[in-house]
Image (cartoon, rainbow, N blue to C red):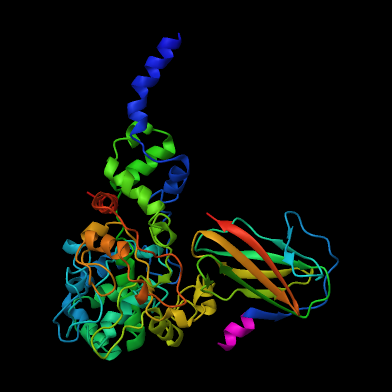
Amino acid sequence: MKLAALCLVCSCGAGWACEPGLGAVPMLAKENAPAVYLTVPAPPVSEPFDIELQFCGDITTVSVSAIMPAHQHGMNYFPKIEAREDGVVGVSGMVFHMPGIWQIQVSSGTASYTHDITVQ
Amino acid sequence: MIRAVCVFLILASPLKAEVLLSQDEIAQTLLHGPWPPAIESDPSNRMSGDAGAIAVGEALFSDPILSRDMSMSCASCHDPEQGFSDGLIRSKGRTELDRNAPTLWNLRWNRWFGRGGDTDSLWAHSILPMAHPDEMDHTPDSLHAALADSDYLPRYEALFGPLGESKETLVNVAKVLASYQETLITTQTPFDGFRDALERGDMVQAATYPAAAQRGLQLFLGRGNCNFCHLGPMFSNGEFHDAGVPYFIDETRVDQGRFGGLKALLRSPFTLAGEYSDDPDKTGAWAVEQVRPLHSDFGTFRVPGLRNVAKTAPYMHNGSLADLTAVVQHYDKIDLERLHADGELILRPLHLTALETADLVSFLESLTSP
């Protein structure tokens, strides 16, 4: 469980200059939280894939998860989160093990963000 | 001219009409192939793909030398003539075991092994029956001694060098067994012929796939929600779900399923992240390092692939369903009270007609090689 907790949360530095990368999409934020941009491929079903996050503001900790709202379950794996020197937060080991609508959930400090994605 | 076009349409339509699937259903069908997937060696097993190791593994597979009292071999429970299962409800080792013997086909593409996912490689999983006291009951030392006194020794040493310490011997024997099991790949099925014809756009050929199987496939993709879990070329997502099958073994014991499998996995030295893997890059170790134990793992079991399913009765982790009709009827009338209270909102009674049940069975049978 210790390993899992370490994987779930990273200590990250200040936010990078906020220029979303090619293909990045803004995540849906609650209220007036600084923007977060998500780069996500078309997820392969039941295979690991990576996403990238760009934060438009200072960040201290980041947690990432995903759920299937219609089925009331999340992922069977903890994603591994890594703050990179270019300011991008890389997230590896995401696995969507069923087709359908998944919701990626990101938290940073008190701010939380979501993005819905359909897996074929 | 108009008459000519109408005549052509009338003549052509019966053939085209026999492909019953919509464009969306065809797109979903294509995702269940092509078969087989790409074949790659297992980097964690240096014997993977080695012809000499495969030959030794095949011989050992049917040799009772792998049981301490010489009473059984791997083939006793995984009989090639019975779909690499044994036809029993629950297998018999030195005593009646707790689960139905799963088939060994197509294991090389698994992420997890065994019904509870106790292991993350085929070689690691091959250790378990050899060492289990209710099954072949070998200790590393007893297996080491049996091998040293056998005709296998020269062939073993040609593969691995001089016989080393006993735990290493156990792992090496498991690795040659795995190299043989990797070769157990199912062949093309009637479903694959249909699927490949659809991909080519050959509707005439596709239309030769029986209408009952097509209707069953439509149910499988649609109202049945079967391909939420039985997806891709393997017809499995490789993960663990609660299918509403009782997990009581008897009045006093329960089968913990994935919950117990994960406990075993996380304390095992034989994982892709461990020292017995031959892969310096630890390919695939992410899964054991990042797997997330959940309370809802209790009583869940790995989704089996469905290829050659008609050859592996009885079904489910406890062998409680005698045939494919019983399996379809189980899901048709699923007891929601048996599912986890916080379980997935996928399984619902289907209220199938007798014809629909027969159609689903026809489809499942078409996943089996002739």
Q: Which residue is painted at 79% across and 77% down in the image?
A: A59
* In-front residue for pair A1/B289: A1
Total numbered labels placed on residues in the image: 0
Left or right, B58 with respect to B264, comes to left
Give residue A88's quadrant in the image. bottom right
x and y percent of residue A25 in the render?
73, 58
Q: Which residues are magenta?
A: A1-7
Q: Which residue is painted at 63% across and 61% down in the image?
A: A116
Residue B280 in sight in this render: no
* In-front residue for pair B114/B327: B327
Left or right, B203 with respect to A47, comes to left
Q: Which residue is painted at 43% across and 15% down in the image?
A: B5
x and y percent of residue B244 in the render?
34, 72
Image height of B136 relative to B281, above or below: below
Taking the view exactly as shown, the residue that stands out farthest to the top is B1
Residue A78 in sight in this render: yes
x and y percent of residue B99 in the render?
25, 77
Quadrant containing the N terminus of chain A in the rendered view: bottom right
Is residue A3 covered in magenta? yes
Give residue B97's quadrant in the image. bottom left
Image height of B270 relative to A46, above or below: below
Q: Which residue is painted at 38% across and 38% down in the image?
A: B197
x and y percent of residue B41 in the render?
42, 62
| Main SS of residues in magenta | helix
Taking the view exactly as shown, the residue that stands out farthest to the left is B71
Give residue B299's quadrant in the image. bottom left
